[in-house]
Amino acid sequence: MEVPLAAVVDLRSAADPDNTPPLPKRFLRHADEQSVVAVRAVQQGIASLEGLSCQSHGVIAAPCRLGRIASSRTLSKYAEGGGVTVSTHIVPHASLHAMAAAVSVGLGMHGPSLGVGGGVEALSDGLLTLVALANTPGVDGWWLVATQVTSEPTIDSEGDPIQTEGVTAEATVEALALLVANPKSTLARHARAWLDLNASVQTDGRLADRIHRCLVATERDCSQPEAA
């Protein structure tokens, strides 16, 4: 999923897709922009697999510089008005694990959830973590969610992104949700490809292009985790 930064505000309160767990009311109200798009991307993935139950799933979130827009806004207000201007939402929604928690709690997943990376190598860090945890007992599937903001937005004096009409390099928020099944689980029937970690070292390009380089079609082998 890739949306203009200005469109994230509408995604916060958008209707949940059919056949997906409904989000609690106003659940994404204070979430970071990348977390909002991440949750919606996972919802799209769930909707595409009819009858999928996510209760036994885990979440690995690999954001690139999560929370920097909110942090910019907070630091600008702090410099002008002091500590009383700092929102209590900055820590739970701008920390590295915030995105994984938003996906896990919002969509009713009871498996482990954690954030990894945080920088430009976040996707590679997420894939390595996924391989390490893929066969965790009791976890039928893992959601690897990678996000980034493209075309870095210009920030005004108050720390808010400047929205300029007609600008070709408009800032966008991109999220990629990859479901990887334990080969012994019922999810394995959806598998389509294997992961090639050697292809994850390239840091340029869109997330979708990078992850496609990591997916290699091959004959099924029930000894390895598979990517759906």
Image (cartoon, rainbow, N blue to C red):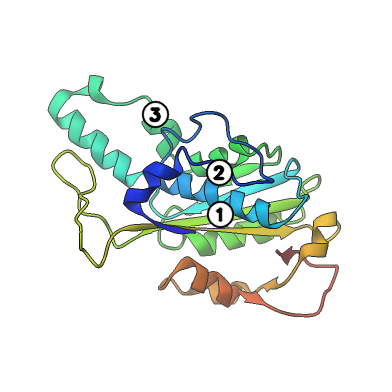
Q: Badge 1: how crowded within 10 Å, few (<14), some, or many (20+)?
A: many
Q: Nearer the viewer, residue 130 or 50?
A: 50
Labels 1 and 2: the sequence-earlier one: 2
Q: CA distance from mark 2 to mark 3?
A: 16 Å
Question: Disc 1 residue type?
Answer: Val
Q: Looking at the image, can residue 149 be seen?
A: yes
Judged from the image, the secondary structure of the residue bearing numbered disc 2 is: helix
Asked whether the residues under the numbered discs 1 and 2 touch, taking CB atoms below 8 Å apart as contact, a structural biologist would say yes
Q: Residue at x 66, y 52 (%)?
A: 47
Labels 3 and 1: the sequence-earlier one: 3
Q: Badge 3: how crowded within 10 Å, few (<14), some, or many (20+)?
A: few
Q: Is residue 63 above or below residue 84?
A: below
Q: Which residue is mark 3?
A: 89
Q: Which residue is mark 1?
A: 145
Q: Residue at x 75, y 53 (%)?
A: 50
Q: Which residue is mark 2?
A: 100
Q: Looking at the image, can residue 185 be seen?
A: no
**Relative image position of residue 76 (x, y in whole percent):** 18, 36
Q: Quadrant of residue 190?
A: bottom right
Disc number at residue 4? none
Asked whether the residues under the numbered discs 3 and 1 touch, taking CB atoms below 8 Å apart as contact, a structural biologist would say no
**Relative image position of residue 86 (x, y in whole percent):** 28, 26
Q: CA distance from mark 3 to mark 1?
A: 22 Å
Q: Quadrant of residue 164?
A: bottom left
Question: Disc 3 residue type?
Answer: His
Q: Residue at x 50, y 73 (%)?
A: 209
Q: Quadrant of residue 221?
A: bottom right
Q: Is residue 84 above or below residue 10?
A: above
